[in-house]
Amino acid sequence: MKAKKVLSLLLATAVISTSLAGCGNSSNNSNSNSNKTSSSSNELKGTITVLTHRTDMTDTFNKYADEFEKLHPGTTIKFENLNDYQNAISTRMSTGNYGDVLMIPANITKDKYKDFFAPLGTRDELSKTYNYLDNFDVDGTIYGIPTGANATGFVYNAKVLKDAGVTSLPTTPDEYINMLKAIKEKTDAIPYYTNYTSEWALTNFSNALQIGISGDPDYMNKMIYNPNEFTKGTATYTSLDLLYEAVKNKLVEQDPMTSDWEWSKQAMADGKIAVMCLGSWAIGQIQAKSKTPDDIKFMPVPVRHDGKAIVQVGPDYGMGVNVHSKNIALAKEFLKFFITKYPQDSNMFSPIVGAKLPDYLNGATDIELVEAKPGTTKQAQDLDTVQKTSLINLNDGKWIKKIIEIGLGVSNETFDQYMSELNSKWAQGVNAVKK
C-alpha cells in the first residue's frame, strides 16, 4: 500500500457531518461492472489528486487507488483527506488549486458550478445510470454525481428492542412512545438519546422528518408559505412532539445537558442506547464500534400512508471534476470508478440505478423511498426571507433545545405555548414573503 498517496491534513479530530458523511456496509448489485470503465487503459495516463472529507478512510482510499492504477497502468491517484472540509476547500477553491476530483462543497450555489466544475454530461444521458441528480443539474447539464444517498428517520439497536418485547416497529406516534416505555421498563438501556449538546442532531426534527410524516415529497416547499406550520396536526408539530413526548415521559438520558455524541455511538453499539434520531449515514459509524453490527438498523418515522412508510432519501456529497484540471479525462474516469466503490464502504444507498438497498433496512417493511421535490430559486429565496424574519432557522438546533428543556421541566413555558410562539414568528416570516 502506498502511504504517499494519502496526504491527510489532520488539523483536528475528524468531525463527520450529520447529513454528509457515513461509513459501513451496503450491497450494490451494479458492482459486477465496477472494474469496467469506459475509457481504454491506453488513453488514461498521468496523475490526479482527489480531495475528500473522509479523514477516517485512508486505508480504504489507498485500496481504491491501487485497484484503479492496476486497471490503468501509467496512472497515479493521490488523495488529500481534509478535516474541516467545508472551510478548507472553500479557501483552496478561491485559488484554483483544489485538486482534480473533489467533493462539491454545499456553499457553492448552482449558478457557480460552471465556474468551478467540468460538465459531466447531460441529465438525459446520466439519469440512465445514476439517481439523485437534482442537486447537480444546471439546465440539463450535470456537474456532479452523488457519492451516495441517506435516508432520514431513526437508528436503533434491534437487540434492545427484542429484549423489551418489541416485535414490530411502531407505525404511529403513540406506538413509538409505548415502545420507548417498554424499553425503559424491561431493559437497562436508555430508550431515546437526545444528543442535546449536538445541535446538528436536533435539526432532524425540524428539517428531516416532515416528508415521512406527511407523505408529501413537496412538503418542505409548501411549509414556506404556511402561516400555521407550528400548529397541531402539521408534520412539523408532530415531528417536534415526538421529541417532547420522549423527554416529558423521562424516556431519555438522565442529564441531556451533558450528552456526548461520540459516547452515544459506542453506547448504542453496546446496547446501552436503544434509539436515536439520525440519518442512515450514522449506521456504519455505530456498526463499526459494535461486536454485533447487524443489530444496528434503520427505523422509518412512526407514521404510515396506505400501509407504507415514506422514507425520504437525499444525496450525500456530490463529486465533481475541477474545471481547471489538466487531466479531465482521467479525473472523470476515476470519479465514475469511485462512485461504484464508496457508497458500499460508507453504508449509504448507492446512486447507481438498480442497486440493491442496504441490509440495515431489514426489519422495516413496506417502505417507499422518495426524494424531496427540489425547490425553485424563488422558493429558496422565500425560505431565506421567512427564516430571517421569523428567526427560525430550520438548520439550526438552538431553538429546538428549548423543547427538551420544557420536557425536563426547567422552562416556565409549556410545549403548546412554545409552539404558539414559534408559529407567530413563522407567520410573520410568511407574511413578509407575501407582501
Image (cartoon, rainbow, N blue to C red):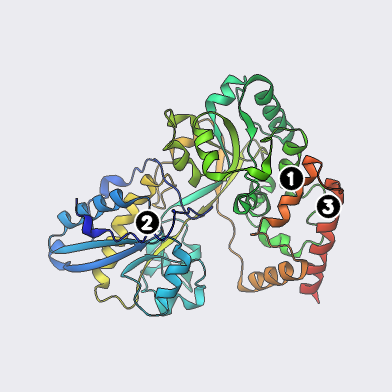
Q: Nearer the viewer, mark 2 or mark 3?
A: 3
Q: Helix, strand, or loop for circle 2?
A: loop
Residue 182 in the image, given as x and y percentages of width and height: 68, 23
Residue 119 in the image, given as x and y percentages of width and height: 37, 73
Q: Which mark is residue 127?
A: none
For the residues labelled 1 and 2, say whether their Cβ atoms are less than 8 Å apart: no
| Residue ID for mark 3 | 418
Q: Label 1 is placed on what type of residue? A: Ile
Q: Earlier in the sequence, mark 1 or mark 2?
A: 2
Residue 142, can we see it? no
- Vertical placement of 293 versus 44: above or below? above
Q: Helix, strand, or loop for circle 1?
A: helix
- Vertical placement of 74 versus 356: above or below? below
- Vertical placement of 33 versus 133: above or below? above
Quadrant assignment for the C terminus:
bottom right
Q: Earlier in the sequence, mark 1 or mark 3?
A: 1
